Amino acid sequence: MLRQKVTLLHCTSEYPTPPEHVNLKAVDTLAQAFGLPAGYSDHTEGLAVPIAAAARGAVLIEKHFTLDRSAKGPDHQVSLEPDELKQMVAAVRSIERALGSPLKIPQPVELQTREVARKSLVAAAPIAAGELFSVENLACKRPGTGLSPMEYWRFLGTASSQNYAIDDLLGDRRELP
């Protein structure tokens, strides 16, 4: 089917195109309106906008290429020279790898740093048994080996069942109100 061979390109025909005239969100509009893959034809100076287009999901990037940016004609001024083209391609490939998936799940490599990176509820000040937990005597600090900071609001205004020194991890789940 011919439709499978078509990719729409969003383009602003201004040489050079200032960033405020680019409207990269139009790439999304084209894809949705026509049900076709959409990309971006760039006339901006530099690498930032085509890399941003890749990050927004443009399936194709067109960027003019020149051996001499000072040559005559409107395209040369906004074209990339060989080393810049290599940089752009490398950056776009890096963006493609970084995009990942729409699922929000921990990466396997994050599991080994989970306890160090996360935080726990701790005593910010000495707390006596029977004393009420408050904004002044609770804090969230690393490591994440104790109760989750997500429990913070459940503790506020409730009485402690034990004594805590500064930086002690709050008790186990039995302490939860």
Image: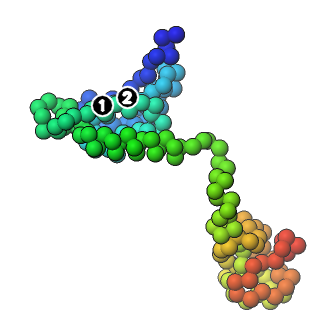
Q: Which residue is mark 2?
A: 10
Is there any visible trace of residue 134 in the rendered image? no
Mark 2 lies on a secondary structure that is strand
Q: Classify residue 83 by image quadrant.
A: top left
- Residue drawn where x is 85% and y is 70% of the image: 173
Q: Which residue is mark 1?
A: 12
Is there any visible trace of residue 88 in the rendered image? yes
Residues packed near mark 1 inside 10 Å, few (<14), some (14 to 19) or many (20 plus): some
Residues 156 and 96: in front is 96
Q: Where is 175 relative to 99, above or below?
A: below
Question: Residue 105, image x and y in percent?
Answer: 67, 50
Tell me the amino acid under the disc marked 2. His
Alpha carbon distance from label 2 to label 1: 7 Å
Tell me the amino acid under the disc marked 1. Thr
Question: Residue 48, image x and y in percent?
Answer: 34, 45
- Residue drawn where x is 70% and y is 87% of the image: 166
Tell me whether the residue at label 2 lies in contact with that at label 1, contact meaning CB atoms closer than 8 angstroms.
yes
Question: Residue 134, image x and y in percent?
Answer: 72, 79
Residues packed near mark 2 inside 10 Å, few (<14), some (14 to 19) or many (20 plus): many
Mark 1 lies on a secondary structure that is loop
Q: Residue furthest top?
A: 1
- Residue drawn where x is 46% and y is 31% of the image: 59
Residues 153 and 50: in front is 50
- Which quadrant does the C terminus fall into? bottom right
Q: Where is 39 relative to 85, above or below?
A: above
Answer with left or right where residue 49 lies relative to residue 100. Answer: left
- Residue drawn where x is 52% and y is 46% of the image: 98
Answer with left or right where residue 151 lies relative to residue 70. Answer: right
Question: Residue 140, image x and y in percent?
Answer: 67, 74
